[in-house]
Amino acid sequence: MIKLFRHIRKRLIGDNRFSKYLLYAIGEIILVVIGILIALQINNWNENKKNDQQEQLILSQLLAEYDSNLQQIESKISLRNDVIKSCITLLNYIHKRPQNITVDSVDYHLSRATMRPTFDPQLGVSNELINAGKLYLIGNTTLRNRISSYSSFLKELNEEELNIFRFTEEEFYAFLIDQYQIGGFTTQFLFDEELRSRFTIGKSLSDFSELKNLVPKANFKNLLNHPNFEDHITRLLGMTPYTNEQSIGVRNKTQEIIDLINSETGKNQ
């Protein structure tokens, strides 16, 4: 083909037909430009196809990540609801003094009231995309924005969780150690298989039932009569529901990201 073009060009020049040669030259340029444009279009198509495949892989990884985060945050909300219920029960023990109060029931509710659930999200895929500057591979602008702002959205929840953790560790536990025998409620977790199953990853749970006979029973009457005990319980009741409200906001944010991911993956099915 190139030889043919050269032959035509030489013949036109030899015949001194400049106008026709000019038209030929323009036509040749146009053909070259068209060829370049076609090559670029094919290259862009291949690149877009490659990016689409990479985007779908990233979306599947993000979906697994945020599904895991959703399950975890829902678990933390459920655990904090247990904290609230046990705090209310302990307040009833203080004021109503039902006849069926036992040391085991006090220990049970103390073990739940002093739980300190914290949300530790998996963000490996999200952080890698952000740090490597690859968020552009996600075509949905709203989804990109939600992922990039997710970490900062967690700050207030993390602060509230830290406040509860510090209060429980530094103040409430110190008070209980001084005013109560804490062996019963601190080992309660080992005897509560339902609670342990919500915390642990493994399916098989060890049997610690023999420990019950090794931990002495505590006298809970002095604890219930102590005015500071009510103060500690009410402080927990003041902090925990608010922290759960923050957790619900995070859960909704997480669910929104999952819905956006599913809408993007559904386009290519």
Image (cartoon, rainbow, N blue to C red):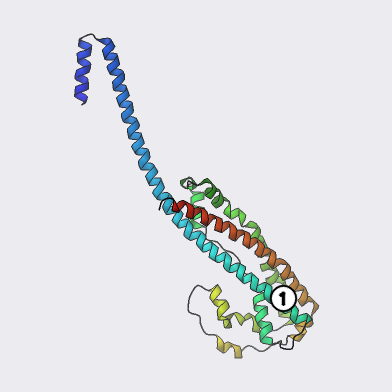
Above or below for 188 versus 24? below
The part of the image, by quadrant, that contains residue 256 is: bottom right
Residue 258 appears left or right of 19: right
Question: Disc 1 residue type?
Answer: Ile
Q: Residue at x 67, y 84 (%)?
A: 105
User: Percent from the top left, x then y, of residue 131?
Assistant: 51, 49
The part of the image, by quadrant, that contains residue 19 is: top left
Q: Residue at x 64, y 70 (%)?
A: 80
Above or below for 89 versus 34? below
Residue 61 appears left or right of 183: left
Q: Residue at x 48, y 53 (%)?
A: 263
Does the image show residue 197?
yes
Above or below for 146 versus 246? above
Does the image show residue 158?
no
Circle 1 Cα neighbour tier, 10 Å, few/some/many (<14 / 14–19 / ≥20): some
User: Percent from the top left, x then y, of residue 144?
Assistant: 52, 48
Q: Secondary structure at mark 1?
A: helix
Residue nearest the viewer, comparing 224 with 187: 224
Residue nearest the viewer, comparing 77 with 110: 77
Q: Quadrant of the N terminus?
A: top left
Residue nearest the viewer, comparing 248 with 76: 248
Residue occupied by mark 1:
88
Q: Residue at x 46, y 46 (%)?
A: 137
User: Percent from the top left, x then y, of residue 132?
Assistant: 48, 48
